[in-house]
């Protein structure tokens, strides 16, 4: 009976260079910057055998979140239009909102959780969080679960 795979989240700096180059080669192919594995491996300086050996074993963290349900937790200023701007971000980047929960604002702040399906999202999770955090009125934006 085959063993169930185990997964770990590891900081990129702790990985051997070959894993990072395989991830880079995969990105070159996925973005269309190169059209073949041969071009991608030549550009990243790894062998094709290394690419094929590790290609299914490494992926950026945000890609693991694709097609999944993610719960975002945000602290917002209690000002008109802030929640509307946040909802606009979700719509702009094609994150399908499933639920919205907000506390009653106290001390000028409200806590909001938004659960969203991310299969069609047009940004990586990291880029999306950065965009949410830069939205006027947002004090803090994080992933709560996913």
Image (cartoon, rainbow, N blue to C red):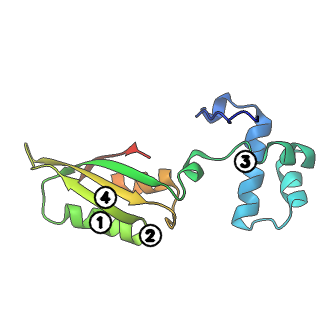
Among numbered discs 4 and 3, the one appearing first in the sequence: 3
Point 29% across, 66% down: residue: 87
Residue annotated with mark 3: 23
C-alpha gap between disc 1 and disc 2: 11 Å
C-alpha gap between disc 4 and disc 1: 11 Å
Point 13% across, 64% down: residue: 80
Q: What is the x, y in percent for residue 65?
A: 53, 51
- SS label for mark 4: loop
Q: Is residue 12 left or right of residue 38?
A: left
Residue annotated with mark 2: 94
Contact? badges 2 and 4 (CB < 8 Å):
no
Residue annotated with mark 4: 135
Residue annotated with mark 1: 87
Q: What is the x, y in percent for residue 100?
A: 25, 58
Among numbered discs 3 and 2, the one appearing first in the sequence: 3
Q: Is residue 55 left or right of residue 80?
A: right
C-alpha gap between disc 4 and disc 3: 30 Å
Label 2 crowd (10 A; few <14 / some 14-19 / many >=20): some
Among numbered discs 3 and 1, the one appearing first in the sequence: 3
């Amino acid at each position: 009976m085959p063993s169930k795979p185990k997964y770990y989240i590891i900081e990129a700096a702790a990985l051997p260079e070959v894993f990072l180059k395989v991830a880079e080669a995969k990105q070159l192919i996925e973005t269309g910057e190169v059209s073949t594995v041969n071009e991608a491996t030549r550009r990243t300086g790894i062998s094709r055998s290394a690419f094929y050996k590790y290609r299914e074993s490494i992926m950026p963290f945000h890609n693991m979140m694709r097609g999944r349900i993610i719960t975002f937790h945000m602290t917002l200023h209690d000002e008109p239009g802030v929640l509307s701007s946040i909802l606009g971000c979700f719509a702009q980047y094609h994150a399908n909102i499933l639920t919205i929960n907000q506390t009653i604002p106290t001390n000028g702040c409200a806590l909001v959780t938004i659960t969203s399906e991310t299969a069609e999202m047009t940004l990586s999770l990291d880029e999306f969080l950065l965009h949410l955090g830069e939205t006027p009125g947002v004090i803090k934006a994080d992933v709560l679960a996913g």
